[in-house]
Amino acid sequence: MKLDLKIQPLSAWITPKNEPLLIAGPCSAETEEQLVATAHLLAKTGKVTALRAGIWKPRTRPGEFEGIGSIGLQWLKRAKDETGLPTAVEVANAKHVEEALNAGVDILWVGARSTVNPFTVQEIADALKG
């Protein structure tokens, strides 16, 4: 995948609606209705700068709920389209990076479980290079 990314400090393209910058949303996106309804409620407060949702959930115990997966990106896009809130998701590998960026996600972050593995961090960095 060839990406044309312009990585900039958050402050260069997103203005906090309050101090501190508030990114909020469900730890785990479980249904489209849950995610979109939560987004609307958060947007109504006027205090939330971006909507986050757990689409993929890295787990300590294999076999536990690992998130709704890629389908949740469509829900996140709908929430963004309806509320205007920028969106954020945790990514744990190169495939997540590609899918999230193709779905129009604005902010990606690498979670604690992923940062302990330098090979994973390198894979994500390489995916962002394109």
Image: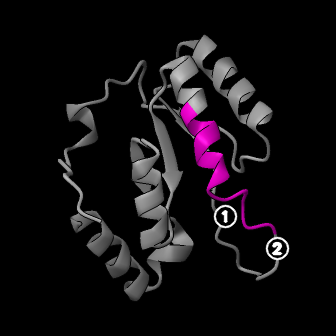
Q: Residue at x 41, y 61 (%)?
A: 98
Q: Which residue bears the numbered disc 1?
A: 57
Q: Horizontal and vertical percent for residue 85? A: 49, 25
The residue range painted magenta reads 65-77
Q: Is residue 28 visible?
A: yes
The colour scheme applied to this rendered structure is: one colour
Q: Residue at x 19, y 45 (%)?
A: 8
Q: Quadrant of the N terminus?
A: bottom left
Identity, as a three-letter code, of the amino acid under mark 2: Glu
Q: Residue at x 62, y 12 (%)?
A: 44
Q: Residue at x 21, y 51 (%)?
A: 5
Tell me if residue 66 is in the magenta stretch: yes
Q: Quadrant of residue 107?
A: top left
Label 2 element class: loop
The answer to whether residue 80 is left or right of residue 12 is right
**Label 1: how many Cα within 10 Å (few below 14, some 14–19, many 20+):** many
Q: Which residue bears the numbered disc 2?
A: 64
Q: Quadrant of the C terminus?
A: bottom left
Q: Is residue 48 above or below residue 95?
A: above
Q: Is residue 105 above or below residue 120?
A: above
Tally of numbered discs? 2
Q: Is residue 110 visible?
A: no
The one of 66 and 11 positioned closer to us in this rendering: 66
Tell me if residue 118 is in the magenta stretch: no
Q: Horizontal and vertical percent for residue 56? A: 63, 61
Identity, as a three-letter code, of the amino acid under mark 1: Lys
The one of 28 and 116 positioned closer to us in this rendering: 28
Q: Horizontal and vertical percent for residue 83? A: 55, 19
Label 1 element class: loop
Q: Is residue 81 above or below residue 111?
A: above
Q: Which mark is residue 100?
A: none
